[in-house]
Image (cartoon, grey):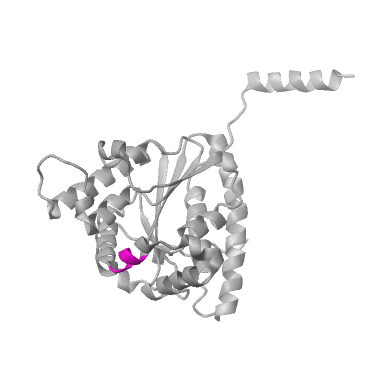
Amino acid sequence: MAKPTDLTPFRVTPGKKIRLKDYDTGWMQAEGLKELGKEQSKQKASAMLEQSLAELSNMQQLLYADDRYSLLIVFQAMDAAGKDGTIKHVMSGVNPQGCQVFSFKKPSAEELDHNFLWRFMKSLPERGRIGIFNRSYYEDVLVVKVHPELIQALPDQPIGPSFWQDRYQDINAFERHLQRNGTIVLKFFLNVSKKTQKKRFMERLERPEKNWKFSAADLAERAHWDDYMAAYEQAINATSTEYAPWHIIPADHKWVTRALVAEVIVSALRGLDLSFPKVNAEQLQLLATARAQLLDES
């Protein structure tokens, strides 16, 4: 088995103030890849991903049998950063019965009449299962911060720094509650460059099989790039905690993104004291009786 990757450069240390411009969006940030050429790096990343997928498949079975923990994986990113593809590839070896993916879109009228966390609470994974949020409650401190006109109807309250600080505190409290009740929260910001986003948008426009992926709204949001980067920085700095850390994953090259995300997930599961349930003496006797009964069949 290959040596596990050092994931420290990608994990945001709680209390440390980060700047997204300090994070490489390419492939050389990953340990062991910098000294290699691009092609060798791709081969290594492919091997890393294959190994992680095999381990994740086994870990999922153990997670389900242990039945004490659940895993919530949160993906946030700018458009065209590769969230869908990452989910598809990283979870390709997982039993679909034990994994659910939720893609949250514009909230409904009913959802707007509840607190901003309500619609996400309904989709949390039960013990033994993996839940994936493709976009999440963080939209309410990202998109809504860039477009404050989208804020749901609230009692008179000025929309200023204290409003957003309160929301960060609400999110931290929510994630702390999840952690105390056995839900492991992993958060990924797929860090794509503006240049690569443009390239992927052009592919969607120029390749007929990808035309359906393009939305004029994506281009409109691109115009707010700097505002989004500021909102992401502030949210990550305020909500990366020991119990629910953020990971900033380079996303200009999909093969790096997928390998690193898979490694983070597997590493988190390795850190749990998962085990198959132990069978007591009475259950062993029942198993022996059932075995004897089957052997006696003609």
Q: Which of 2 and 281 is in front in this view?
A: 2
| Whether residue 263 can be seen here | no
Q: Which residue is at 32% across, 60% downward?
A: 13
Q: Which of 121 and 210 is in front in this view?
A: 210
Which of the 4 quarters of the picture holds residue 153? top left
Relative to 38, is 213 above or below?
above
Magenta residues (range): 219-223
Above-or-below relation of 239 to 170:
below
Is residue 170 visible in the rendered image? The answer is yes
Q: In this view, does 187 lie to the left or right of 162?
A: right
The residue at 40%/68% (across/down) is: 192
In the rendered image, which quarter contains the N terminus?
bottom right
Q: Which of 275 and 10 is in front in this view?
A: 10
In the depicted view, which residue is nearer to us: 98 or 77? 77
Residue 169 x %, y %: 22, 47
Relative to 110, residue 50 above or below: below
Q: Which residue lies furthest to the right in this view?
A: 298
Residue drawn at (52%, 53%) of the image: 266
